[in-house]
Amino acid sequence: MSRTEVSSHRHAGPRTWWVRPGLEIVDGRLQIAGRDAESLARQHGTPLYVYDLGIVGSNVRALQSAFARAGLNGRVRFALKACREAGVLRYLRELGAPGTAESVGIDACSPGEVRFAIEQGWEPREISFTGTNVSERDLDALLPHAVLINVDLLSQLDRFGRRAPGSSVGLRLNPRAGAGWGGEGATLYSGAKPGKFGIYEENLDDALGIARRHELSIVRAHVHVGDGFLTRGLPKFEGAIERVSAMVQRLLDAGCPIEEINTGGGLGVPLQEGDEPLDVDAYAEVLARHLGGFGVTIACEPGDFLVKQSGTLLAEVVTVEDRLGTTFVGLDVGWNVVSDHFVYKMPIEQVLVRAADAARTDRVTISGHINEGNDLFAEDYPFPPVSEGDVVAMMSVGGYNQSMAMPHCLRPVPPAIVLDADA
């Protein structure tokens, strides 16, 4: 039985697997960071993104502590493409002074993200840039800043060398292995099928030749071999990291003064009932086993792991209607601003905020307000009895939703509020 089939055949009782500190049920009602979710929706209007900073901070510190326990000189950078909400970024910036073990750097993948990160207070040396198909115009924008640039194609390395001879650079490597969502399947970033990212082991000698020609110093090895993996995906992740270790050794044997191995992102969070959270200590131990012996900085660049669970979207039910035997629950929000299900095929847990622990006795199709037939958030979905005017919460949408929103049909991007349970 597939993950989707397992989810659709759950019992009709309460479904509260998602409850955690900061996202709780009090007297049957959903609370976010100690605030009543329906009251937030009525006060600020819907649709509304709500971010809980406490969850962000807890996840950052969990990773940093796991690296320290594993004996690694760890560095956590945030994948900026996951979330650009100003309040979240300000909070991340304030977690530690630049260069300290408590600080959080930035993973950027475009010149625009580099500029944005600098505007938000990050110093260039805290920003790691790893793009793909980088143009001359991109380099024009990047090279004036002292950011850490990693290139992922031979042609890019040559272009970089022509523009910045004698400088240092990082190589994005592709070990042809990785761990996909939850641990099942592959990832589009690194697998058996030729892809758009990274330099293969077969091309390392070519890369070294290009670097010598332009007197470049290869000081970083970068990989991205994960895509939402959880604990059960660690064996596949470890297989990829083992290959990375061999590639790094080749670079060292060729005289490259490697200072950092950047293991990328792709760390996942539970998205549906039955998902077990990622064991961050086991994750760090994998890195220590295969990369710790190099004695260099070990970096990671999570996006979803830091912010996805921090974000909840509140929407109003505007339609409840039986259509040829199927109950449609229509919301005042669409796929243009909550794209996880449509772009990444991820499930989005839906909760009726006034009855968050109610038995799910009905089967419904939850639809959005975009004038497209596939604007459906869930079909044959177990849900409590619901009425027009109710508020529904979409859980764990803090990453890759608001940041990817577009005004399709001129439906606006929802506003956001940022909460801190300690404030």
Image: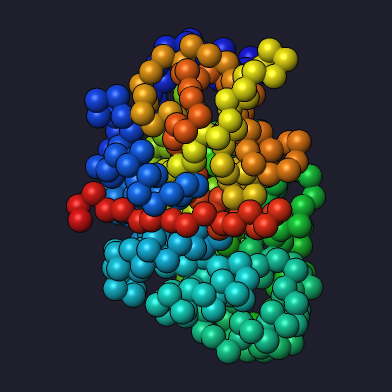
Q: Position of residue 366 (x, y in %)?
A: 60, 29
Residue 322 seen in the figure: yes
Residue at the left extreme, as displayed: 422
Colour mapping used in the image: rainbow
Residue 130 seen in the figure: no
Q: Is residue 404 above or below residue 395?
A: below
Q: Position of residue 259 (x, y in %)?
A: 48, 71
Q: Is residue 140 above or below residue 42?
A: below
Judge left or right: residue 379 versus residue 209. left
Q: Which image quarter holds the C terminus?
A: bottom left
Q: Is residue 11 above or below residue 126?
A: above
Residue nearest the observer in this picture, 359 or 144: 359
Q: Position of residue 155 (x, y in %)?
A: 79, 73
Q: Position of residue 74 (x, y in %)?
A: 38, 60
Q: Is residue 299 above or below residue 160?
A: above
Q: Residue at x 31, y 29 (%)?
A: 29
Judge left or right: residue 84 versus residue 285. right
Q: Residue at x 48, y 25 (%)?
A: 387
Q: Which image quarter holds the N terminus?
A: top right
Q: Residue at x 67, y 57 (%)?
A: 410
